[in-house]
Image (cartoon, rainbow, N blue to C red):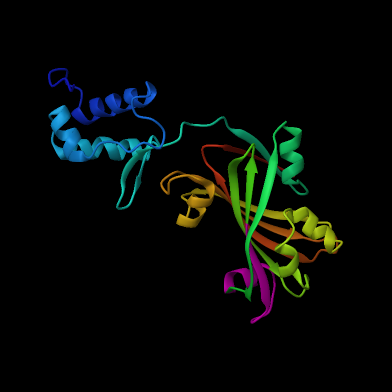
């Protein structure tokens, strides 16, 4: 119960109570917590106090809210994965060297007119086409990152067919006899979009690390612009050039 004599703010005490219930297994991962009205009656505090405690735990990633459904217990923090970004690094090689099991899925490949911001980055002309797809990557069957990739159509003829069958971007480039290297990376902390959160298996209020990448071929031709979204609770990135 809430101690109303010790001077500790009620919402802080309620946060501690809920955290203990999670730590002891009384509230388990994925379980919905009681509604505000129920906790208000149980702990004899007003609903504002309950709401403040729940919001703080959501901010800390202990709980997460789903619109129209309620508030749930988030997954326990995972061991971080140290991942190195370099000019020529490959995801599968990186993870395998660490003793992990990598996996990749290429999702929703489409052909489209290049968006203006991507057109400028890839030095394309107005109206040029690009292939766009999502790349979902796993480590030991856990979602690790999801990326959106843009590829100039004039450089990769019939790429839509290949993107629908290959499950590795490295194998995709090999089909076109291209050796790629990263020439630029921009890193920032932010929150995922709804689609990114779903693909990563995290709530929308969990921080992520987004990395924008530009790739060139061995002939110094810009061949890819991508935005990789890494799980903030799982990825520990280092940039080595």
Q: Nearer the viewer, residue 1 or 227?
A: 1
Q: 51 left or right of 125?
A: left
Q: Is residue 241 above or below residue 160?
A: above
The quarter of the rendered structure image containing the C terminus is top right
Q: Residue at x 49, y 56 (%)?
A: 195
Residue at the extreme top:
6
**Bounds of the magenta segment:** 116-134
State the count of labels: 0
Residue at the extreme bottom:
127
Q: 201 left or right of 28?
A: right
Q: Residue at x 62, y 34 (%)?
A: 81
Q: Residue at x 72, y 32 (%)?
A: 98
Q: Nearer the viewer, residue 162 or 208?
A: 162
Q: Residue at x 70, y 41 (%)?
A: 102
Position of residue 152 measured from the top left corner of the image (x, y, whole percent): 71, 71
Q: Is residue 178 visible?
A: no
Q: Is residue 238 visible?
A: yes
Q: Is residue 49 above or below residue 16?
A: below
Position of residue 49 measured from the top left corner of the image (x, y, whole percent): 18, 36
Q: Nearer the viewer, residue 194 or 223?
A: 194
Q: Is residue 112 above or below residue 3?
A: below
Position of residue 15 measured from the top left corner of the image (x, y, whole percent): 28, 29
Whether residue 178 is in magenta: the answer is: no
Q: 238 left or right of 31?
A: right
The quarter of the rendered structure image containing the N terminus is top left
Whether residue 125 is in magenta: the answer is: yes
Position of residue 210 measured from the top left corner of the image (x, y, whole percent): 56, 50
Quadrant of the image occupied by residue 43 = top left
């Amino acid at each position: 119960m809430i101690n109303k004599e010790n001077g500790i703010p009620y919402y802080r005490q309620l946060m501690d109570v809920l955290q203990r219930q999670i730590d002891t297994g009384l509230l388990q991962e994925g379980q919905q917590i009681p509604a505000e009205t129920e906790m208000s009656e149980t702990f004899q505090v007003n609903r504002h106090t309950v709401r403040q405690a729940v919001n703080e735990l959501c901010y800390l990633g202990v709980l997460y809210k789903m619109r129209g459904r309620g508030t749930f217990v988030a997954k326990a923090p995972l061991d971080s994965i140290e991942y190195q970004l370099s000019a020529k690094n490959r995801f599968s090689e990186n993870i395998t060297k660490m003793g992990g099991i990598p996996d990749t899925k290429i999702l929703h490949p489409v052909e489209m007119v290049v968006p203006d911001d991507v057109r400028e980055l890839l030095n394309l002309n107005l109206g040029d086409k690009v292939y766009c797809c999502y790349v979902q990557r796993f480590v030991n069957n856990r979602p690790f990152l999801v990326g959106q990739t843009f590829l100039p159509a004039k450089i990769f003829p019939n790429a839509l067919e290949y993107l629908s069958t290959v499950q590795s971007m490295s194998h995709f480039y090999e089909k076109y006899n291209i050796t790629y290297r990263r020439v630029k990376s921009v890193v920032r902390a932010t929150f995922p979009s709804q689609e990114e959160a779903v693909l990563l298996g995290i709530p929308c209020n969990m921080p992520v690390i987004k990395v924008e990448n530009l790739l060139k071929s061995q002939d110094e031709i810009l061949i890819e612009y991508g935005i990789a979204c890494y799980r903030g609770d799982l990825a520990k990135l280092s940039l080595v050039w």
